[in-house]
Image (cartoon, rainbow, N blue to C red):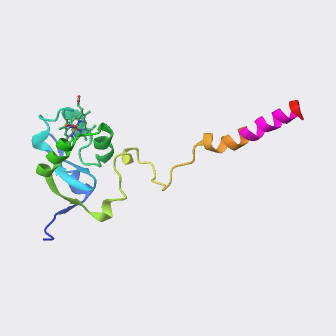
Amino acid sequence: MSDVKQFTYDELNEHKTRDSLWLTIHKKVYDVTAFLDEHPGGDEVLLEEAGRDGTEAFEDVGHSDEARDMLLKMYLGELKASEFAKNTTTAANGSAQSGAPAPSPVRFLMPVMVLIAWWVYRQYFA
Ligand code: HEM
């Protein structure tokens, strides 16, 4: 059976209200409209993830297996592969997506600090 529906973020974005609320978790698309009033975590958090990738938000909470089973009832289809790169969770500010994150300055400074400490040590004990 290859009857699975494929969705784009444009389509998801047409369902961002209480009357029809879709979101995607782990590249699967769910209709959570009927679940809004039942969600133990409240409706606000679901509305916030409307039309975008809620994977991180969902996983951060550490949802139970029971919660994961509930998703089966809300399943609509898959997110189109061409949409995977568009992670709308953070794209709201319009910043360009540039592959790897910038290296932390602390990681860069660490070897320099070790060298300075070694040099100071030598000044006193050499
Ligand atoms: C449609 C997907 C979701 C389902 C089926 C779902 C289901 C559930 C269930 C059953 C619980 C009770 C605890 C548990 O069994 O883990 C729960 C709690 C919670 N959920 Fe969700 N959830 C969904 C999405 C989200 C999202 C996107 C967020 C965003 C942050 C979220 C935030 C929370 C929070 C904060 C709690 C804890 C509530 C508390 O204990 O006070 N959930 N959810």
Q: Is residue 40 above or below residue 55?
A: above
Q: Can residue 19 be seen in this view?
A: no
Q: Is 51 covered by the magenta stretch? A: no
Quadrant, the C terminus: top right
Q: Is residue 58 above or below residue 9?
A: above
Quadrant, the N terminus: bottom left
**Residue occupying the point 24% across, 48% down:** 51
As drawn, is 2 to the left or to the right of 92? left
**Residue occupying the point 46% across, 52% down:** 96
Dominant secondary structure, magenta: helix
Q: Is residue 26 visible?
A: yes
Locate residue 76, reporting x and y percent: 15, 56
Location of ligand 1 given as a quarter of the image = top left
For the record, the magenta segment spans 114-123
Which residue is at the far top?
Answer: 124
Which residue is at the far bottom?
Answer: 1
Q: Is 118 covered by the magenta stretch? A: yes
As drawn, is 57 to the left or to the right of 15? right
**Residue occupying the point 14% across, 51% down:** 72
Locate residue 109, reporting x and y percent: 67, 41
State the count of labels.
0
**Residue occupying the point 25% across, 40% down:** 63
Which residue is at the far front?
Answer: 125
Which picture quadrant has residue 111? top right
Which picture quadrant has residue 66? top left
Locate residue 70, reporting x and y percent: 14, 45
